[in-house]
């Protein structure tokens, strides 16, 4: 009886080990087919209206600072990652305009125009990233994107907290230009 029990345990462990090994092989095959390609962004990638600001005082893409995302060939993730990277770039551009004493009324208007839809879409983007992270559990081929997704989620959560204040500041600054024009 004891020998049968020992043999049964060995059989169970052998079966479990084989199943795990074959499962990992499938995951490795899926991951090998997925390579990350880093895509760098410019202001015009976020909004065509911002092309004239590239290389200027308000361009957040200067020196060592860059905005990029990793493209894996997964349509769902690639769209989320690009939207997140462009959102962060627009927020930094808009914040630069807000904090600058050199910003003109046109600069403020351009920043507000770019930031408004981004600020409105932050909650959906947080939801999209959270949903993607949840989908990784059922699709192991997306596991290599998990760390990236968690980082993006942190960035977007922070941006969603900051964007409304920056937008409010831009609107107040624009109102100041209007008030100044009326007094002249």
Image: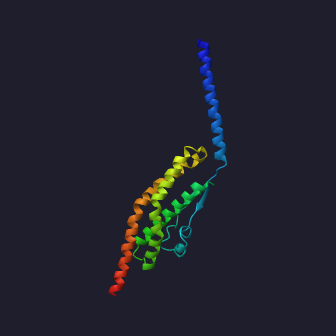
Whether residue 183 is situated above or below residue 97 in the rendered picture: below
State the scheme by which the image is colored.
Answer: rainbow
Q: Nearer the viewer, residue 24 or 139?
A: 139
- In the image, residue 82 lies at what x, y percent? 55, 60
Q: Which residue is painted at 46% across and 60% down in the image?
A: 122
Question: Outermost residue toward the top?
Answer: 1
**Who's the residue at 51% across and 59% down the image?**
84
Task: Classify 76 as above or below 9.
Answer: below
Q: Is residue 154 left or right of residue 32?
A: left
The residue lying furthest to the bottom in this view is 184
| Residue at horizontal 47 percent and vertical 55 percent from the top | 126
144 displayed left or right of 100? right
Q: Is residue 76 above or below residue 167?
A: above
Camera sees residue 150? no
- Closer to us: 18 or 76: 76
| Residue 166, position as x, y percentages in the image | 40, 67
List the single residue furthest toward the left: 183
Is 115 drawn above or below residue 27 in the view shown? below
| Residue occupying the point 40% across, 59% down | 161
Give the x, y percent position of residue 89. Answer: 50, 65
Instruction: Find residue 83 and report its horizontal and vertical position in percent.
Output: 53, 61
Q: Is residue 38 visible?
A: yes
Give the camera-side residue of 170 and 19. 19
Q: Quadrant of the N terminus?
A: top right
Split into 4 quadrants, where in the image is the C terminus?
bottom left
């Amino acid at each position: 009886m004891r020998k049968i029990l020992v043999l049964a345990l060995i059989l169970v462990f052998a079966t479990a080990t084989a199943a795990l090994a074959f499962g990992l092989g499938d995951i490795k095959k899926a991951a090998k087919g997925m390579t990350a390609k880093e895509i760098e962004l410019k202001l015009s990638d976020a909004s065509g209206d911002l092309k004239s600001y590239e290389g200027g005082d308000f361009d957040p893409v200067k020196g060592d600072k860059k905005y990029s995302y990793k493209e894996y060939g997964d349509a769902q993730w690639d769209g989320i990652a690009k939207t997140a990277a462009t959102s962060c770039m627009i927020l930094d551009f808009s914040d630069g305009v807000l904090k600058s004493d050199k910003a003109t009324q046109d600069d403020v208007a351009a920043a507000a125009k770019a930031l408004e839809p981004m600020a409105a879409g932050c909650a959906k983007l947080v939801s999209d990233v959270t949903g993607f992270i949840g989908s990784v559990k059922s699709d192991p081929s997306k596991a290599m994107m998990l760390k990236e997704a968690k980082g993006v989620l942190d960035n977007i959560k922070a941006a969603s907290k900051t964007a409304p204040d920056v937008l409010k500041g831009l609107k107040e600054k624009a109102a100041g230009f209007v008030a100044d024009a009326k007094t002249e």
